[in-house]
Amino acid sequence: DKLIKIWSTRTQRLYRTLRGHVSDICDLAVSVDNRFLASAGNDLDIRLWWLHNGHPVVVLTGHQATISRVTFGLALNADLSHSLVSIGMDGTTRIWRVSSGGEYMGCTTYSTSEDSAPGGPAARE
């Protein structure tokens, strides 16, 4: 139904419904600091949400086919930015960077075709 529903395990009641995707949702991920929720949909969008209030942060676009996986990396750098990795059926893996305040900071794309390797000529910013 294109919705993300967050339930309370304590009360077993619906806590919040997130709306924004226009197609089925394929994957969800929560950042290690529980600040963000990322959702990937068949609409080719990745949506980032504030987990504490359910408000949208940013919509990340660029995949040309269904996004099959989305996951957060650790925020190990000095600015505490978050890395979000997405894998698409378009043959690309993208590493998105988002600040701890929710500001989009860029994306690096890697082709997963046989003639390229991460960091090689197929990597582009």
Image (spheres, rainbow, N blue to C red):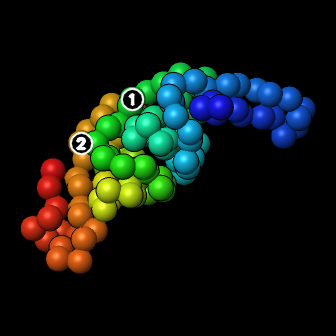
Residue 19 at x, y = what percent?
57, 24
Which residue sits furthest right?
11
Within 10 Å of disc 1 (Cα), the crowding (few <14, some 14-19, many 20+) is: some
Q: Amino acid at mark 2?
A: Gly
Looking at the rendered image, the quarter that the N terminus falls into is top right
Label disc, if present, on residue 18 of the rendered structure: none
Q: Which residue is mark 1?
A: 58
Residue depicted at 39% across the width and 41% down the height:
44
Residue depicted at 28% across the width and 42% down the height:
62
Residue depicted at 33% across the width and 31% down the height:
103
117 relative to 34 in the view: left or right: left
Secondary structure found at label 2: strand
Q: Which residue is mark 2?
A: 106
Res. 76 visible in picture: no
Within 10 Å of disc 2 (Cα), the crowding (few <14, some 14-19, many 20+) is: few
Q: Which of the pair 28/3 is nearer the observer?
A: 3
Residue depicted at 23% across the width and 53% down the height:
108
Res. 116 visible in picture: yes
Upstream in sequence: badge 2 or badge 1 = 1
Secondary structure found at label 1: strand
Picture mark count: 2
Which residue sits furthest bottom?
114
Residue 110 at x, y = what percent?
24, 61
Location of residue 3 by image quarter? top right
Q: In the figure, 87 relative to 65: above or below?
A: below
123 relative to 77 in the view: left or right: left
Residue 26 at x, y = what percent?
55, 48
Q: Which of the pair 118/2 is nearer the observer?
A: 2
Location of residue 102 by image quarter? top left
Q: CA distance from mark 2 to mark 1?
A: 12 Å
Q: Amino acid at mark 1?
A: Val
Q: Are marks 2 and 1 in contact (CB under 8 Å)?
A: no
